[in-house]
Structures are given as structure tokens and as C-alpha cells.
């Protein structure tokens, strides 16, 4: 099997011409091929091209790069005895993939998720978005699938990790389209992701694991520096291995863990959602609306540094998406972006964020970043009308410095730095700084403001506890969180023998 890059097709050429293009380059017959990467090169708007990297076999030996083996290999089982089945707290990307890998290797994990199952959670979220009736335990942040379930379902990541292929392959196994294995910017959309999550849950159960909903971690029990058990919804459960995949919004859990586990403040970012017509973004990137070219809705990724030394950047861009209220606590309002798989809303939104540093917090307490977030989410609740409506304005009004509901819901330094950055970003993407762009606040949970410290074996100072994913401060997004969950599963597998639990 060989690998070849820079196979190019015009945007109006059918994909099955890839074979012909390879044969023209290598001057021999291709027996079989697999696309491993597809990207869109739109730098020249008069000649937009699809660009492919392909693994293939030929009818003779070639002097070409051999394709690497991308198959995931499970670690060798350790020999230590587990007295109880491993427990996973949280069923977002980190917890899901950790539990799945453990189940695949015979460890029969027990999962506890504070929110509802996918079926019930969707009903709760839809009721909240329609009526403003919030369920603090099951919402856009909490429940089966985690916060990523009500998002764009974006699977891009800045990390390079051999486990990424495993994550994508499992998503395909449970209903995601095959194309996510090779798309440069894969996404599945919230509608498909809901079914993928349910499929993973059912597979864990089929392999002997358990998944329990409406089950909240309330305490951890330990003796002589080792985990002995946990308390979930008032019930003590004996366990010697606990995976904390709690998500970045589990503030009550952070507070329960404070003083028991070592934590530190962590930088994050804050700002708002900005929305434009999708055609404006398409024309800026392609020269024409995407539908006229037969291309997917265009996206963007922008960043700059201001004169004050702050980074301002776009985050979690949702082509053809929707802006939704992502509240999880009573009396607090925040926003997020979400897309369905077709990305067909006609609107494009993205977070526009300014970096927030620990020195901006009001104390040295490890959870002062949480309190910083809460302060401005409460302001957003008030400025939105105290009914979970999100404060809104236009970009023109925001940058004018005039008082408005969004400006009044953000720290002054965030407002000042974003105002300075907007013209710079507008020069990078034509129309981004359009005065009539919609601005919706606040975006405050781009990442966790706290990190739960762990050692090289991924455990805390209390042995047997493995914090992971976004909530623990070790990931940022669906794919990186899932990879961290697999990494934790590998540590558990390498340490303990799954065949002699209990």
C-alpha cells in the first residue's frame, strides 16, 4: 500500500476521477485506493480545487512512500487486580470513549451521568429553548453526549494523536458518515451526533458495561491516599478506579472536589457570538455563494493580537448554524453555536473571544475562574430580561462604545480588546466587520477555567482517580476530549487485568 498526495480535482469533477488522476501520476494501473484526506483549496477563487491524499495499491512495485498503518492497537493488559469494576463519571466525549475502550477490552465499566439519556435530554432542551424552563441537571451542558451534542458536532482538533483515527472510526461505526475519516474539517451535526452517542451507549451495555442517567457524583471516599468509593445520588458505591470526565460546566462538582484534589487556575476566553448571512461568508471565501458552486457552506478561522497584548480570535465557527442559549445554572445566561448536519440555516455564527488570564481573576483561589464566569453570566441573565433570553446588539453598536446589553455583560478589558480587533479581523475576511452583524452574549465557556492536576500516570494525588477531558483542563473539543478518554482507558488497561475484576 502506497501513499500519494496532491491529487487535485476541479470542483465540478466527480470524485471517482481520483483513480484516473493517480494512474496519470504513477503511470501504472491502480488496483484499489482509499482517500485518507480531502481538503478544499480556495486561495484562487477562479480555480477552487479539491485536494486529496490517497492510499492505494498498484499492479507493480513503485518507488513511493509506503502508507502508514492507521489501525488502533489496544495496550497489553496489566497484572494488578481490580477489586471493583471501573467507574466513569460523565458521558460526554471523554467519558464515552473511555468507557467504550474499557468495555471493548472486557472491563465492564459503570458509567454515571448526572443528566438524562439522549431521548429525554432532547425534550428538556427543546422545552427550555421554547419556554425558558431550565432543568439544571439536564440541559445543553449536561446529559448523554455532553456539551458537544448540542453543537456543530465539529471533529477538527489542533492536536496530533494516533487516537484520532480510533475516535473517528468509532463514530462511523455508530452512524456518522464515512467521509469524516478523510475530510480536512469533519463535522457530523447535532442531529447525527445524537444517534452516534446512543449507539455507543448501547454497545457499552452489550459488552457488559452499565450506563446510568440522572446519577450525580456527590462525594469521593478515600483512605491512606487511595480511592475506596464514591457517593452517587445519596448511594455509596465501592470502587478503586474512578474516571472524572465531568465536563467544563460541572461547577458544583469542582467545589465538592476542592481541597480533596489538587487544582489550579487555568486561562480561558470570553466574548460573544457574532452572526452573518452565510452568503457573505461564502462570497468572502469562494467568490460566490456556496450553493452556486456546489460547495459546502464556507467557514473561517481568524485571530490577531491587540496593542494591549491580548489574543482575540474566532472559535467554534458554525456554518449554516444557529445561536442557542446554553445555560446550565439558574439565573445565568450564556450562548453557544449549533449546526445540523446539512448546515442549511442560511446564517453563519462564531464565537469572538478575548483571552482571559488568571491574573484577571479576583483571587488566587483555584475556583476563582469559575466565579469570574458566573459573575458575567449573571449580568447576561439580567441584561437579557431575566428569562434566559440572550442579550443582543449589532456589531456597529458594540464597536461604537455606546452602552448596550452585550457590552454591559462583559468585562471592560474584553470589550476594549474586541473593539480594537474587529477592524483587523475585517481586513482578513471581507465583511466580517459589517456593522449590521448580529452580536449575542455572552460566550463564557470556551474551555474550563480550572485544571485538576494529574501525574504522568494520569492519576491525582489520590491514587485511583483519573481526571480527563475538557472539565479537567486537558482537552478542548469533542475529538481531543475523546482522545484523552482513550488515553486514560489505556492507562487503566496497562495497569490492571480485566479478566480478574472483583
Image (cartoon, rainbow, N blue to C red):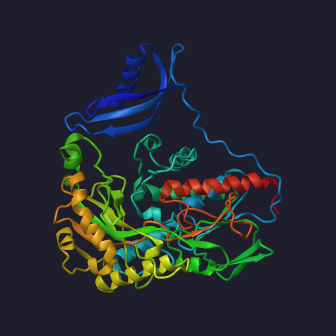
Q: Quadrant of the C terminus?
A: bottom right
Place residue 184 in its image quadrant.
Answer: top left
Q: Splitting the image into 4 quarters, where does residue 83 fall?
A: bottom right
296 over 211 or under it: above or below? above
The residue positioned 57% from the left and 53% from the top of the image is 483
239, 362: nearer the viewer: 362
Judged left or right of residue 429, residue 120 is right
The x and y percentages for residue 78 are 79, 51
Q: Is residue 470 visible?
A: yes
Q: Which of 424 and 133 lies nearest the eye of the viewer?
A: 424
Relative to 77, 296 lies left or right: left
Q: Is residue 153 left or right of residue 77?
A: left
x%, y% of residue 497? 80, 54
Residue, x 49% and y 25% (percent of image)?
56
The residue positioned 47% from the left and 49% from the top of the image is 176
Identify the residue at horizontal 53%, vertical 79% (top origin). Answer: 364
Q: Is residue 411 left or right of residue 501?
A: left
Kindly tell me whether residue 277 is visible in this rendering: no
Location of residue 456 in the rendering, given as x and y in whole percent from the top left corner: 68, 57
Q: Is residue 265 above or below residue 380?
A: above
Residue 180 x, y percent position in the rendering: 45, 44
Amino acid at each position: 500500500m502506497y501513499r500519494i498526495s496532491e491529487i487535485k480535482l476541479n470542483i465540478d469533477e466527480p470524485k471517482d476521477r481520483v483513480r484516473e488522476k493517480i494512474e496519470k501520476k504513477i503511470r501504472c494501473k491502480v488496483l484499489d485506493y482509499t482517500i485518507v484526506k480531502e481538503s478544499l483549496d480556495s486561495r484562487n477563487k477562479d480555480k477552487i480545487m479539491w485536494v486529496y491524499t490517497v492510499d492505494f495499491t498498484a499492479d507493480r512495485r513503485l518507488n513511493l512512500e509506503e502508507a502508514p498503518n492507521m489501525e488502533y492497537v489496544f495496550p497489553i493488559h496489566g497484572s494488578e487486580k481490580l477489586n471493583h469494576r471501573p467507574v466513569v463519571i460523565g458521558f460526554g466525549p471523554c467519558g464515552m470513549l473511555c468507557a467504550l475502550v474499557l468495555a471493548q477490552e472486557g472491563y465492564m465499566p459503570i458509567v454515571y451521568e448526572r443528566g438524562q439519556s439522549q431521548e429525554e435530554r432532547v425534550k428538556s432542551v427543546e422545552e427550555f429553548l421554547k419556554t425558558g424552563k431550565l432543568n439544571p441537571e439536564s440541559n445543553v451542558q449536561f446529559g448523554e453526549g455532553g456539551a458537544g451534542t448540542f453543537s456543530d458536532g465539529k471533529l477538527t482538533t489542533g492536536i496530533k494523536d494516533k487516537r484520532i483515527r480510533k475516535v473517528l472510526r468509532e463514530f462511523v461505526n455508530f452512524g456518522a458518515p464515512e467521509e469524516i475519516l478523510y475530510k480536512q474539517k469533519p463535522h457530523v451535526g447535532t442531529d447525527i451526533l445524537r444517534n452516534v452517542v446512543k449507539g455507543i451507549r448501547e454497545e457499552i451495555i452489550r459488552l457488559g458495561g452499565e450506563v446510568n442517567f440522572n446519577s450525580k457524583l456527590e462525594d469521593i471516599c478515600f483512605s491512606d491516599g487511595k480511592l475506596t468509593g464514591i457517593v452517587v445520588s445519596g448511594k455509596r458505591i465501592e470502587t478503586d478506579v474512578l474516571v472524572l470526565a465531568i465536563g467544563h460546566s460541572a461547577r458544583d462538582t469542582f467545589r465538592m472536589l476542592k481541597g480533596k484534589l489538587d487544582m489550579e487556575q487555568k486561562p480561558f476566553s470570553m466574548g460573544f457570538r457574532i452572526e452573518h448571512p452565510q452568503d457573505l461568508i461564502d462570497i468572502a471565501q469562494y467568490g460566490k455563494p456556496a450553493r452556486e458552486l456546489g460547495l459546502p457552506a464556507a467557514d473561517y478561522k481568524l485571530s490577531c493580537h491587540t496593542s494591549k497584548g491580548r489574543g482575540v480570535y474566532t472559535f467554534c465557527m458554525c456554518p449554516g448554524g444557529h445561536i442557542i442559549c446554553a445555560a446550565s445554572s439558574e439565573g445565568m445566561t450564556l450562548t453557544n453555536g449549533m449546526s445540523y448536519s446539512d448546515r442549511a440555516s442560511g446564517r453563519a455564527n462564531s464565537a469572538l473571544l478575548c483571552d482571559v488570564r488568571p491574573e484577571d481573576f479576583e483571587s488566587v483561589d483555584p475556583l476563582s475562574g469559575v466565579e469570574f464566569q458566573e459573575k458575567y453570566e449573571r449580568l447576561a441573565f439580567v441584561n437579557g430580561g431575566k428569562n434566559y433570553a440572550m442579550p443582543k446588539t449589532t456589531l456597529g453598536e458594540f464597536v461604537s462604545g455606546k452602552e448596550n446589553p452585550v457590552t454591559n455583560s462583559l468585562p471592560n478589558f474584553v470589550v476594549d480588546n474586541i473593539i480594537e480587533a474587529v477592524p483587523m479581523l475585517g481586513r482578513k475576511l471581507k465583511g466580517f466587520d459589517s456593522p449590521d452583524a448580529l452580536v449575542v452574549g455572552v460566550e463564557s465557556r470556551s474551555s474550563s477555567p480550572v485544571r485538576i492536576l494529574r501525574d504522568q500516570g494520569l492519576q491525582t494525588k489520590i491514587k485511583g482517580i483519573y481526571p480527563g477531558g475538557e472539565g479537567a483542563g486537558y482537552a478542548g473539543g469533542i475529538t481531543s476530549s475523546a482522545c484523552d478518554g482513550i488515553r486514560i482507558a489505556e492507562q487503566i488497561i496497562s495497569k490492571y487485568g480485566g479478566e480478574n475484576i472483583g
